Amino acid sequence: MYIGTFRFKAGTNPEIGRVVLTNKSAEAGKRVSADAIRFGGGMGLVARNRTTSGRPKYLEGSRYFLQYAGMPDSLVFNFNRNILDYNDDYQSRAEYLNYLKGAPYGPNRNRKAKGLGVPIDLSLSFHTDAGIKGEKDR
């Protein structure tokens, strides 16, 4: 259940800058749990054409997140040798999983790459072409 988005002021303020889960309720026997709490993530840091996107990291293409996360550039960029980020964006998602798992399932450019040895049971990625014009429509 998504509870909402809450904005915090910059800096440290232990009186109001925190998340607290409690089971204080008028009904006895109820439980409270959380599987994730996300704090920001910051603004995009990866420069392309000598400038950053000016957007939060979560809005940038996956290839930029992968660079930020430490995946070697040689394994993720320019799959199709074109200047557009479009294909690299959706193709890099699976390549990241291949890198996390590592040999013999490493990234396409080097299946023997050691990777990080992270076991992957399931991966789900969402990509949409909504709002994207083809080359002939530009």
Image: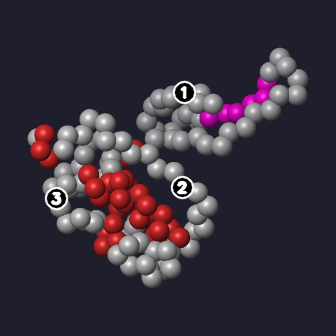
Give the residue at mark 1. 4
Q: Position of residue 2 (x, y in %)?
A: 58, 30
Amino acid type of disc 2?
Answer: Ser
The part of the chain drawn in magenta is 19-24
Give the structural element (helix, strand or loop) at label 1. loop
Q: Residue at x 24, y 54 (%)?
A: 85
Disc 3 element: loop
Residue 49: x percent and y percent?
15, 55
Along the polypeptide, which appears first: circle 1 or circle 2?
A: 1
Please state the horizontal and vertical placement of residue 21, each as a whole percent of the image. 70, 33
Q: For the view shown, which residue lies furthest in the top direction?
A: 26
* Amino acid found under the numbered disc labelled 1: Gly
Q: In the rendered view of the protein, which quadrant contains the N terminus?
A: top right
- Which residue is under mark 3? 83
Residue 16, relative to residue 63: is it above or below?
above
Query: Is 46 situated left or right of 4 in this image?
Result: left
The residue tagged 2 is: 123
